[in-house]
């Protein structure tokens, strides 16, 4: 009967030791705190293996793991925020470039319309079109600007047919530049 009591005490000591070691105690995570059995008396005791100490250690480990996870999540959130900012900047840049392209296209189209109107006015014999040519010229590509300059020279010489020719060349050059290289 004496061995039965000793067996129960040994089982109790092992249970307390496993409880104190936590779920990873067998794998070395809590090996430094493994309870030791005092061999002096008939009573078996556990050094530093009380359930309160084990619970405190487990709480400490959980807190440290939670803090590491929080730090990792914060770093990931910071990275995601950085990527979002970069994407927003790129999108704003694309929108700005798109708006500038649309504005330039609208200005060029307006200049082509002014050239067409100028060509019609020249066809009716109206030679007072220099202001319209001057306002349309800056929005045109370089080859079309050269053609408009030639049209101005023809108007100064009062050759309206040649002026119409150069204006039509300016319109064609503008349309060609809008199609691409």
Image (tube, rainbow, N blue to C red):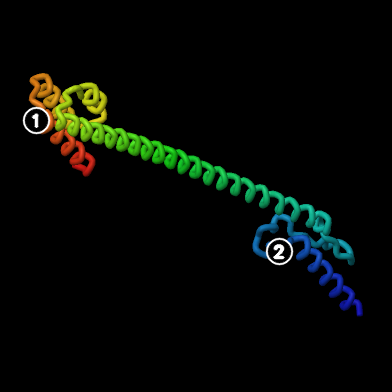
Determine the CA span between mark 1 and mark 2: 99 Å
Q: Position of residue 44 (x, y in %)?
A: 86, 65
Q: Position of residue 51 (x, y in %)?
A: 83, 59
Query: Which sits in the foreground, 11 or 159?
Result: 159
- Element at label 2: loop
Q: Earlier in the sequence, mark 1 or mark 2?
A: 2
Q: Residue at x 20, y 36 (%)?
A: 174
Q: Are marks 1 and 2 in contact (CB under 8 Å)?
A: no
Left of 62 or right of it: where is 55? right
Left of 41 or right of it: where is 56? left
Task: Specify the quadrant that holds the C terminus.
Answer: top left
Q: Answer above or below: position of 86 versus 24.
A: above
Q: Position of residue 130 (x, y in %)?
A: 20, 22
- Count of all numbered marks drawn on residues in the image: 2
Q: Residue at x 26, y 30 (%)?
A: 139
Q: Nearer the viewer, mark 1 or mark 2?
A: 1
Looking at the image, which residue sits at the far top? Answer: 156
Query: Which sits in the foreground, 111 or 38?
Result: 111
Q: Which residue is mark 1?
A: 161
Q: Residue at x 11, y 19 (%)?
A: 156
Left of 173 or right of it: where is 2? right
Q: Answer above or below: position of 36 versus 173.
A: below
The quadrant where residue 93 appears? top left
Q: Which residue is mark 2?
A: 23
Query: Which sits in the foreground, 44 or 89?
Result: 89
Neighbor class of circle 2 (other Cα within 10 Å; few <14, some 14-19, many 20+) is: few
Looking at the image, which residue sits at the far front? Answer: 124
Q: Position of residue 79 (x, y in %)?
A: 52, 44
């Amino acid at each position: 009967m004496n061995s039965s009591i000793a067996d129960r005490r040994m089982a109790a000591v092992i249970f307390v030791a496993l409880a104190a070691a936590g779920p990873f105690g067998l794998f070395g995570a809590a090996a430094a705190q493994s309870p030791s059995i005092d061999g002096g008396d008939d009573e078996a005791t556990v050094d530093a293996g009380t359930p309160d100490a084990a619970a405190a250690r487990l709480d400490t480990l959980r807190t440290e793991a939670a803090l590491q996870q929080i730090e990792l999540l914060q770093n990931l959130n910071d990275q995601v925020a950085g990527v979002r900012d970069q994407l927003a900047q790129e999108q704003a840049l694309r929108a700005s470039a798109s708006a500038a392209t649309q504005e330039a296209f609208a200005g060029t189209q307006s200049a082509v319309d002014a050239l067409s109107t100028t060509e019609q006015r020249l066809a009716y014999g109206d030679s007072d079109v220099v202001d319209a040519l001057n306002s349309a010229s800056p929005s045109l590509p370089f080859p079309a600007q050269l053609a408009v300059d030639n049209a101005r020279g023809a108007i100064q010489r009062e050759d309206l047919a040649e002026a119409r020719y150069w204006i039509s060349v300016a319109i064609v050059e503008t349309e060609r530049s809008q199609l691409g290289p």
